Image (cartoon, rainbow, N blue to C red):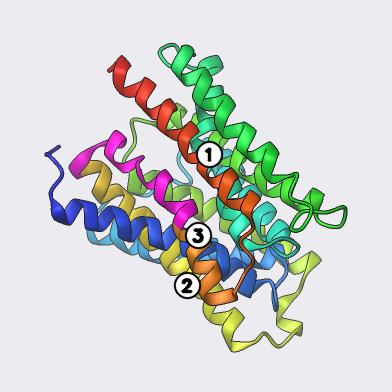
Amino acid sequence: MRQPKLIDYILLVILALIWASAFFNIKIATESFGPVTIAFLRVFFGSIPVLLLCFYKKIRVEAFSKDWYWFAIIGFVNLVLPFFLIAYGVKSVQSNLAAILMSTTPLSSTVLGHFYTKNEKFNALKTFGILIGFAGIIYLFSDDILINDNNFISALLILLGSTCYVVGGVLTLKISKKKNENVTGSILIWAVLILLPLVYFFEKPWNSVPSIESTISVVYLGMVSTGAAWLLRFKILKNNGLIFQSQVSYLIPIFGIILSYIFLDELITDKVLVSLFAVLVGLYFVKKAGLNKS
C-alpha cells in the first residue's frame, strides 16, 4: 500500500459518484421493471466485467468448487436480498432517502462486528458514533412530508437491505483468503442462478415494453454501479487499504442527494439535511475510534 496521491482521491470520488448514482437510476428503473427483474439484471450485467477480468488475469472462478454453498449463501444475502429490497423500497420513496438509509451500513457493521469478531468491540467513541448516526435515521423517519403511512414499510425495507450487506460482509470472512475477484465473480454467478427462476415465475419482464430510460438505467446499474464499481473498489483497496477506501461512505449520501435533485428534482427537506449531518457525524466518530485503536 502507498500514501494516497491525487489520483487516489480522484478514484475515491469517482467510486462514490458511481455508487451514489445507483439510487436515482434504481428509481428510473422501477418505472418499467419489477424489483426481482432489477435485481436480476443488476447481477447479470454486473457479472460481465468481473468475469472478463478474471478471464484476462487467469483467476480461477470457484463458484462450483467445494465451497459452492458459501458463494451461494453470500450471493443470496449480499446481492439478491439487498438488490431486491432496495428496488422494492425505492419505488415508493425518494431515492435520496435511500442514499441516506444505505449510508448506515458502516454503523451496522460496527454493531455486528462487536458480536461476531474478536477485535472490533465497542468503546465509548464507537458507541457515541453509533447512537448519533442511528438517531439521525430515527429523525429521518419522523419526516412526514417524505415518509408516511403509505411508504413507511418501504423505507424500512431499504434499511433492511443495508443490513443484508453487513451480514454478507460477515459471511465473506469465511472465505476471506480467496481472491476478491474470484469471490465477487462466484457470488455474482450464484445470484444470477438464484434470481433467474424467480424472474420467470413472478415477473416475466419479456411480456412488457420497458422505456429506453429504464433500460439504460438497469444496464448502467449492472455494468457500472455493480461490476465496474467493484473492480474500482479492488484497485483502491489494493493501492491504499481499507481505511482509505472506507471514506467513500461519507461521500455517497451527499452525492446521492445532489444527483437525485439534479436528475429527478427530488425534494430536500430540513429533516433530510439534519439526518444526513447526524449520520456523517456518527460515521466520523466510529471511524475515528477505529483509527485511534490502530
Specify the label residue 225 is tagged with.
none
Q: Report the predominant secondary structure element of the magenta stretch.
A: helix
Q: Earlier in the sequence, mark 3 or mark 1?
A: 3
The span shown in magenta is: 239-254
156 horizontally vs 48: left or right? right
The residue positioned 25% from the left and 37% from the top of the image is 241
Residue 124 rendering spot, x and y as whole percentages? 47, 12
**Separation (CA) of disc 2 from disc 1:** 28 Å
Amino acid under disc 3: Gly
**Residue 176 in view here:** yes
192 horizontally vs 159: left or right? left
Disc 1: CA contacts within 10 A as few (<14), some (14-19) or many (>=20): many
Specify the label residue 256 is tagged with.
3
Residue 91: quarter of image:
bottom right
**Magenta-drawn stretch contains 244:** yes
Q: Determine whether the residue tagged by mark 1 lies in a helix, strand or loop.
A: helix
The residue that mark 2 highlights is 220
Amino acid under disc 2: Tyr
Disc 3: CA contacts within 10 A as few (<14), some (14-19) or many (>=20): many
Considering only vertical position in the picture, is 126 above or below 17?
above
**Magenta-drawn stretch contains 157:** no
**Separation (CA) of disc 3 from disc 2:** 16 Å
- The residue mark sitting in front, 3 or 2, is 3
Q: Earlier in the sequence, mark 3 or mark 2?
A: 2
Considering only vertical position in the picture, is 284 above or below 61?
above
The residue that mark 1 highlights is 279
